[in-house]
Image (cartoon, helix red, strand yellow):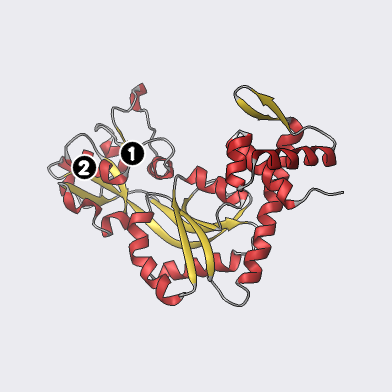
């Protein structure tokens, strides 16, 4: 006897929510029904998958392995349904797209009207989040594709190029470097460098492209921003200098603050914006078509 998809779904939800009651609520079943499904799954595989503790549910070693495989099987089953529903109709039906916050407000306003006009049967669900969480959602099948920036660890994923997004220096308008045509990253070494908080991939892209380190001279950063708009306001207030992507500048990000942006005198100071999807996904064709549409937006 083999486990059913329903039993595997119960296990996945139990792993995600950490309790039988919350997992049952997410599955829209009663707690006894979900418990019976987990018990039957344990009988089939011949090992307990969870330990019950006061703090909640703890997966056993067998449960961890079963959950990992369950996620893959459920993602494949969902791909089968999606492929059947959208056969012969590119970018139609439900499409779950993740976008990182340093791209979403600058590229999507131009792209979404084009996508609606070109693919009227598309039902787009957007999720804005940090790259690490979007990648996890892609690999688990919770997202169909993600609009992210490289370089990043793309193990188990495929992707299509959208655009190379140049990184620009951002300094207060009265800064000594504001009058220069190009700015060398190392020339800003004496200034307070303001970056996005840890977790934003743009932070790592800036440091790598500009050959900088986050803690210069052994000192902790005095300031870190939670978003690009906040970062620009901090620069405009004279708290330090930073780097911003060209797509954000073109969208008007720096127009509301006394900030001057200049090109960087460095080798390839840019990030690559891509549409990524899980390797082997039935939405690969849609991912490539989406990337082509975004290129033209």
Judging from the image, what secondary structure is the residue with disc 2 in?
helix
Q: Position of residue 71 (x, y in %)?
A: 67, 47
Instruction: Verify CB contact (< 8 Å) between mark 1 and mark 2.
Output: no
Q: Residue at x 69, y 50 (%)?
A: 72
Number of the label disc, if any, that sits on residue 53:
none
Report the quarter where the C terminus lies: bottom left
30 or 13, nearer to the observer: 30
Q: Residue at x 48, y 46 (%)?
A: 131
Q: Position of residue 90 (x, y in %)?
A: 55, 74
Q: Give the answer, above or below, for where 152 lies relative to 189.
A: below
**Taking 74 as reference, is 4 left or right?**
right
Q: Give the answer, above or below, for where 106 lies relative to 87.
A: above
Asked if one can make out residue 87 in the rendered structure from this viewpoint, the answer is: yes
Q: Residue at x 54, y 68 (%)?
A: 93
The residue tagged 2 is 233
Number of the label disc, if any, that sits on residue 226:
1
Dot 2: within a 10 Å radius of its alpha carbon, few (fewer than 14), some, or many (20 or more) residues?
some
Q: Residue at x 68, y 52 (%)?
A: 74
**Taking 180 as reference, is 210 left or right?**
right
123 or 101, nearer to the observer: 123
In which quadrant of the rendered view does residue 200 lie? top left
Q: Position of residue 266 (x, y in %)?
A: 35, 48
57 or 290, nearer to the observer: 57
**Taking 166 as reference, is 68 left or right?**
right
Q: Position of residue 204 (x, y in %)?
A: 43, 41
145 or 211, nearer to the observer: 145
Q: CA distance from mark 1 to mark 2?
A: 12 Å
């Amino acid at each position: 006897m083999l486990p059913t998809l329903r039993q595997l779904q119960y296990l996945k939800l139990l792993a995600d929510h950490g309790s039988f009651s919350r997992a049952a609520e997410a599955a829209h079943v009663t707690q006894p029904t979900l418990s019976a499904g987990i018990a039957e799954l344990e009988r089939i595989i011949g090992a307990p998958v969870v330990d019950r503790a006061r703090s909640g549910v703890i997966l056993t070693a067998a449960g961890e392995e079963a959950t990992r495989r369950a996620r893959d099987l459920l993602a494949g089953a969902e791909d089968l349904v999606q492929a059947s529903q959208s056969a012969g109709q590119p970018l139609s039906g439900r499409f779950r797209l993740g976008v990182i916050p340093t791209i979403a407000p600058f590229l999507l306003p131009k792209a979404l009207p084009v996508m609606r006009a070109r693919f009227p049967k598309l039902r787009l669900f957007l999720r804005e989040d940090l790259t690490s969480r979007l990648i996890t959602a892609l690999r688990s099948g919770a997202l169909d594709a993600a609009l992210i920036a490289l370089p990043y660890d793309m193990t188990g994923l495929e992707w299509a190029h959208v655009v190379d997004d140049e990184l620009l220096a951002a300094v207060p308008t009265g800064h000594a470097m504001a009058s220069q045509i190009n700015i060398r990253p190392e020339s800003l070494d004496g200034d307070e460098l303001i970056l996005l908080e840890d977790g934003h991939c743009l932070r790592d892209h800036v440091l790598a492209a500009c050959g900088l380190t986050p803690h210069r001279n052994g000192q902790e950063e005095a300031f870190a921003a939670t978003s690009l708009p906040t970062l620009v306001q901090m620069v405009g207030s004279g708290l330090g200098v930073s780097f911003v992507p060209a797509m954000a500048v073109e969208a008007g990000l720096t127009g509301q603050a006394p900030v001057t942006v200049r090109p960087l005198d460095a080798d390839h100071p840019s990030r690559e914006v891509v549409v990524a999807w899980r390797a082997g996904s039935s939405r690969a064709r849609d991912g490539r078509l989406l990337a082509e549409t975004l290129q033209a937006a």
